[in-house]
Amino acid sequence: MASGCSNVTDVGTVSSRDAVDYLLGIARTQSGKAAGEAIFPITIADSVEVTQNIYSIVKDESRPNEVRGKAIFWLGQGAGGGDYLSSLYTRVRSEELKDKIIFSMSQQKDAASQKWLVDLVSNESESIENRKKALFWAGQTGTSMQQLTGLYSRMDEREMKDQMIFVFSQRQERVAIDKLMDIAKNDKDRDARKKAMFWLGQSHDARVSAFLTDMLNR
């Protein structure tokens, strides 16, 4: 049958390996939207192991942050991605990329990744902003209240304590409200007590109304 597209050449079936190599070439050499969008189809290539290749793109400081950020995102979607991501964190210098790694680690939802987030929160050599981000995502993704309350007792920095109180306010467990009431009643830091009182005021826990009334009548 004659084709209406006589100028199109049929090159036959392209193997997954060849397709991946072609797309990797784009991701490794081009800039802009094309390079970033080349990464997703690489991750779904059939029967081709691509994790190491994506890892190498993130490590390549000659690549634009937009491309490296896409690689971080898709690296975080793969099995065992946490090991690659945690090793990348100390290698990258861009705060934007560190932010993406923290988020991607939070999406792993395994014990090792949760521990990595908690360790980052505790690491005073890291910036306050990155520690606050790690704390937020640790609180959102299932780090136990026991771990979080343990962290609070070791916090000295005002911004970290404020972030911890906010994280407690976002948790639904009874123990989170218990901790906020403990802070509001017993913390030596007046500002911490005020912030705990504020967030307790937003709670629908039946115990909070009586607690706040008692505190105000003191």
Image: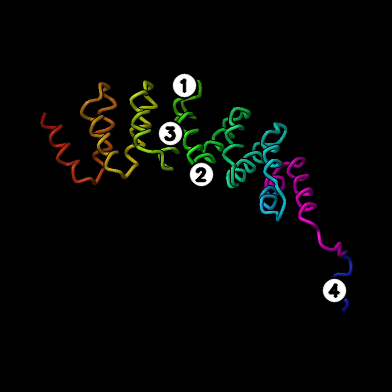
Circle on res. 4: 4
The answer to whether 164 appears left or right of 2 in the picture is left
Task: Find disc 3 in the rendering and name its residue.
Answer: 135
Secondary structure under the numbered disc 1 in the rendered image: loop
Reading the image, the residue beneath label 2 is 107
Q: Position of residue 58 (x, y in %)?
A: 66, 36
Q: Could you tell whether 151 is left or right of 36 in the image?
A: left
User: What residue range appears in magenta?
Assistant: 10-36
- The answer to whether the residue labelled 3 contacts the one labelled 4, judged by CB atoms less than 8 Å apart, is no
Classify residue 170 as left or right of residue 16: left
Calculate the distance from the C-alpha at mark 1 to the C-alpha at mark 2.
23 Å
The image quadrant that residue 186 belongs to is top left
Q: Callout 4: 10 Å neighbours few (<14), some, many (20+)?
A: few
The quarter in which the N terminus is drawn is bottom right
The kind of residue tagged 1 is Glu
Give the residue at x 85% y 70%. 5
Q: Quadrant of residue 185?
A: top left
> How far apart are labels 2 and 3 at the CA level?
14 Å
If the image is split into quadrants, where does the C terminus sit? Answer: top left
Report how far apart the C-alphas of labels 3 and 4 lie in the structure.
60 Å
Q: Which numbered dot is residue 101?
A: none
Q: Is residue 130 left or right of residue 216?
A: right
The stretch drawn in magenta includes residue 123 = no
What residue do we see at 54% from left, 35% from top?
A: 99
Q: Are marks 2 and 4 in contact (CB under 8 Å)?
A: no
Q: Which residue is mark 1?
A: 124
Q: CA distance from mark 4 to mark 1?
A: 67 Å
